[in-house]
Image (cartoon, rainbow, N blue to C red):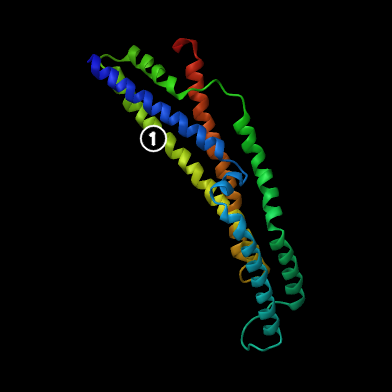
């Protein structure tokens, strides 16, 4: 079984090295800011001005349409109060034009706990050394080829950790889409009939930031667990 043990140990070492590389790359790129998003999707910043113009156009179109309805040009349809409509339209034109600044303020607020989580002090971490810890534990409680059992456990652990990393990356991309399409979402708030769309966008935006923070928290919990095992004198 010596050859099999060495093959299994080599595979386990490569799996943990790969996990270490992926973890470093993903955690370093994510955050409640759009720097990484713009680095991989530079067209989003260019097309943002298109969404601003589209949003202002939608607000003005809705404004004119509802004013016409108030004058009875379209019979049988309900219309909003023209004064309230005008105030609301001017307000949301302002919000749509400065939506980028508003969203960045929200990202700064949401990014504060995210940065606290990522910069918190944790035990030293090296995924490649974690395999030897598992082998040492299994060697106490099991007989036979413990390296093979350790490999199975490592594969299960690595697969679930990678899924969590990609879930965090997916949340970050979705957050970027919400950020750069924010002007259109603000435009939906200019009318009572479409106000629910704007409220839904606000809930989705806040929810994605919260889930991104919770993903980072879960990942840091995992890495702290690994670091604690590696720093434990029983396994060094």
Q: Which image quadrant: the N terminus?
A: top left
Residue at 56% over, 43% down = 212
Picture coordinates of residue 4, whole percent (x, y): 24, 19
Picture coordinates of residue 88, whole percent (x, y): 73, 69
Residue 233 vs residue 93: left or right? left
Residue 13 vs residue 72: left or right? left
- SS category of the residue bearing label 1: helix
Nearest the viewer among 75 and 139 is 139
Q: Most extreme residue toward the left, as rendered?
A: 1
Residue at 73% over, 77% down = 81
Count of numbered badges drawn on the protein = 1
Residue at 55% over, 20% down = 123
Nearest the viewer among 135 and 210 is 135
Nearest the viewer among 213 and 147 is 147
Q: Quadrant of residue 85?
A: bottom right
Q: Is residue 200 above or below residue 217?
A: below
Residue at 68% over, 44% down = 108
Picture coordinates of residue 197, whole percent (x, y): 59, 64
Other residues around mark 1 within 10 Å, as few (<14) / some (14–19) / many (≥20): some
Picture coordinates of residue 163, whole percent (x, y): 43, 39
Nearest the viewer among 212 and 33 is 33
Q: Is residue 28 above or below residue 4?
A: below
Q: Is residue 203 visible?
A: no
Q: Is residue 27 visible?
A: yes
- Residue on which disc 1 sits: 159
Q: Is residue 22 above or below residue 190?
A: above
Q: Is residue 121 above or below residue 116?
A: above
């Amino acid at each position: 079984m010596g050859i099999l043990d060495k093959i299994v140990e080599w595979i386990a070492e490569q799996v943990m090295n790969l996990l270490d590389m992926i973890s470093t790359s993903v955690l370093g790129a994510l955050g409640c800011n759009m720097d990484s998003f713009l680095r991989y999707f530079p067209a989003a910043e260019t097309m943002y001005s298109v969404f601003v113009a589209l949003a202002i156009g939608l607000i003005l179109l809705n404004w004119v349409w509802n004013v016409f309805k108030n004058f009875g040009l379209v019979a049988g349809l309900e219309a909003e109060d023209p004064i309230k409509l005008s105030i609301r339209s001017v307000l949301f034109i302002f919000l749509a034009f400065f939506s980028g600044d508003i969203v960045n303020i929200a990202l700064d607020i949401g990014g504060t706990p995210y940065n606290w989580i990522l910069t918190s002090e944790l035990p030293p971490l090296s995924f490649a050394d974690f395999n030897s810890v598992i082998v040492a534990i299994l060697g106490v409680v099991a007989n036979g080829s413990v390296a093979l059992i350790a490999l199975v456990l490592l594969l299960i652990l690595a697969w679930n950790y990678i899924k969590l990393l990609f879930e965090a990356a997916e949340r970050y991309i979705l957050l970027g889409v919400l950020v750069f399409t924010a002007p259109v979402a603000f435009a939906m708030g200019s009318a009572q009939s479409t106000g629910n769309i704007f409220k839904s966008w606000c809930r989705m935006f806040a929810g994605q930031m919260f889930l991104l923070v919770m993903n980072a928290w879960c990942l840091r919990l995992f890495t702290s667990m690994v670091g604690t095992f590696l720093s434990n004198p029983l396994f060094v």
